[in-house]
Image (cartoon, coloured by chain):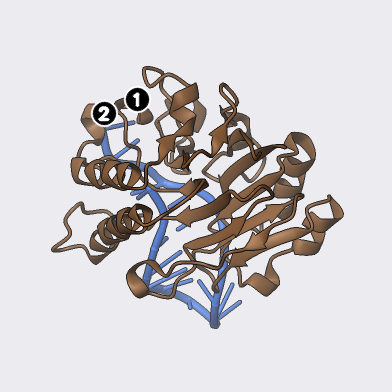
Amino acid sequence: MRATIATWNINSVRLRVELVAAFLEQEAPDVLCLQETKSPVDKIPAERFAELGYSHMAARGEKGYNGVAIISRIPLEPLGHEDFCGKGDARHVAARLPGGVALHNFYVPAGGDEANRDTNPKFAHKLDFVAEMADWGRGLDGPAIAVGDLNIAPLEHDVWSHRQMLKVVSHTPVEVEAFEAARAAGGWGDVTRADISPEEKLYSWWSYRAKDWALADRGRRLDHIWARGGAAAVPGSSRVLKPWRGVEKPSDHVPVIAAFELG
DNA sequence: ATGACATTAGCATAATGA
């Protein structure tokens, strides 16, 4: 069967439950992976999603921060989570899809302001987290999809100005190096950039602070879809849904989508 | 060229985002 999978940093699932509902109705992905749900699992409005046919969920949450959820209209077999960096935070959750492909939903730490692991513990956490993703990925076997807010824009055209972003957390060389190492270690392919030329500017996040986010268009591609081990993306199926940044009370991220043959 | 904004917890303001 063919299934479409979307990833979206929603910046509070409770505040934006009707935005998620509108997305499910209009785009109708088979599976939606959310990050920054900022909600305990039992407070996620799962009934609202079930009303729309999305009756399956695998989620982890904490009060106020982080939080990841996989909501689906096709069955999910929960696969638990990895506790990256041993912090017990809600930054990863996994589930198996029909046909056997494992789906991993990540929220990588933002990393704070200063790109220095010795003086900024948040940056150290981010680098350690991505290094653990590499170790974890090395041990994987079988087909898998990894999605989420990875909080790193690896390519030159994943940011509005490569030159001006080199010292800004999310595009520093040390982060990009760690990101590429994690991607390669797991044998992951960048599904989105296989479909949309790396020569083309492509963003999934725009700051709330800009006076006019669309006019300035100073975005970053922080949200990713990766596949490995024979998980087969449908060529040309990738989309980054920029219009969702322009709605009333938007998230600062937009959904990223791809379709897969689940076998 | 950085913006000076959004969200949560909890009830003022601090922490966090990136």
Q: Label 1 amino acid?
A: His
Q: Nearer the viewer, residue A65 or A29?
A: A29
Residue A44 vs residue A174: left or right? right
Task: Say which quarter of the image contains residue A3.
Answer: top right
> Picture coordinates of residue A252 (x, y %)?
52, 44
Residue A121 vs residue A50: left or right? left
**Circle 2 SS class:** helix
Residue B13 vs residue A155: left or right? right
Task: Say which quarter of the image contains residue A258.
Answer: top right
> Picture coordinates of residue A51 (x, y %)?
86, 55
Residue drawn at the location 26% of the way across and 61% of the way down: A128
User: Which chain can be seen in blue?
Assistant: B
Where does label 1 land, which residue?
Answer: A157
User: Which chain can be seen in brown?
Assistant: A
Chain of the residue where label 1 is placed in the rendered structure: A
> Picture coordinates of residue A135 (x, y %)?
30, 58
Where does label 2 land, which residue?
Answer: A162
